[in-house]
Structure formats: C-alpha cells, structure tokens
Image (tube, rainbow, N blue to C red):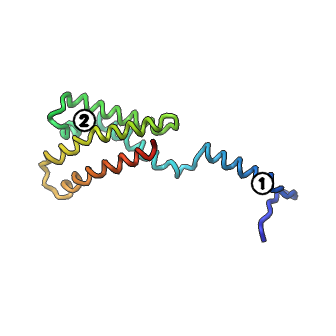
Amino acid sequence: MPLVGFIGNSILRPQVFHKAQIDLTYIEQLNPPLMENSSLYIMSVMYILAGIMHFIKPKAYLRIMPRYLPYHLPLVYLSGVFEIVFGALLLFPATQTIGAWGIIAVLIGVFPANIHMLQTNKVKKTWYIIALWVRLPLQAFLIYWAWAFT
C-alpha cells in the first residue's frame, strides 16, 4: 500500500508534497552534503600543509632543487606560498577554479624537482627508489584530481 503523507490528522495534497521536494532539492544544491566535497577538502588541506612544510623544513626541499635553478631558498618559500594560497582558494566556490588551476601550475612547476630527485638519488633502499619512481606518474593523478575542480 503506498504511503500517504500525514501531518497530524491532515493529508498532504500532492502539489504541496511536490513543492516541498523542490524546496528540499534547492536547499541541498545550496549546501551540498559533506561527502560530495570531501575530496576537495582533503586536497585543500593536503596542499596547505605541504606549503607550510616548506617553511618548517626548507632543507628537505632545498635538497631536491635542480642545480640549474637560481635562488633555491626563495623558490622553496615561493612554492610554499603558492601551495598554501591555492590550497586555501579551493575551499571557496568563488575561487575554487583559480585554486585548482594554480595547483595544476604548481604541480607542473615542481615536476623537474621530482625528476632531479630521482636522478641524483644516493639512497640505495629499494622502497625509497620505488617511491621516487611512483612519484612521477602520481603527479599526473594529482593534476587530474585538481582538474576535476576547474
């Protein structure tokens, strides 16, 4: 038997019930469920934290800077600022596209450092070498992930 809507003793008329559904859909569009945006929030926090690490542990980033680039420390700080700013821009619908394109630009910009890190590696541990190789195609995934929010 189909369910008929009741509020107290009055039966909801179909047009009123239908209007309530439209209003609910409109409200859900204004405030999407958390799960729909969880990927965006994870990406945003990931880049903000990574950017902060450029200031906390700059030596880790200086070690992977290619020699042909000048001004290593300022570039480490600048890339950290970009990661923080673009990561934060992802959090706001009005600036989400700018943030996503900025993240893509940063990922492309730091790709030479990932290649340099692989080429100049002196660590002989197998897991570390595998991680360096996996990091290269991972950049493509990270670019795609950011592109999904453009």
Q: Which mark is residue 17?
A: 1
- Amino acid tagged 1: Phe
- At 50% from the left and 37% from the top, the residue drawn is 92
Spatial separation of the CA atoms under disc 2 and disc 1: 59 Å
**Nearer the camera: disc 2 or disc 1:** 1
In the picture, the quarter occupied by the C terminus is: top left
Q: Secondary structure at mark 1?
A: helix
Residue 122: horizontal and vertical position, in percent?
Answer: 12, 48
Q: Is residue 55 left or right of residue 62?
A: right
Residue plotted at (30% across, 30% down) = 78
- Name the residue: 16% across, 56% down: 125
Which of the pair 142/5 is nearer the observer? 142
* Residue density around tag 1, few if under 14, some if 14–19, many if 20 or more, within 10 Å: few
Tell me the SS state at disc 2: helix
Which numbered marker is on residue 45? Answer: none
Q: Quadrant of residue 49?
A: top left
Determine the residue located farthest toward the right in the rendered image.
9
- Amino acid type assigned to the residue bearing label 2 in the image: Pro
Percent position of residue 35, x then y? 52, 52
The residue that label 2 is drawn on is 58
Mark 2 or mark 1: whose residue is earlier in sequence:
1
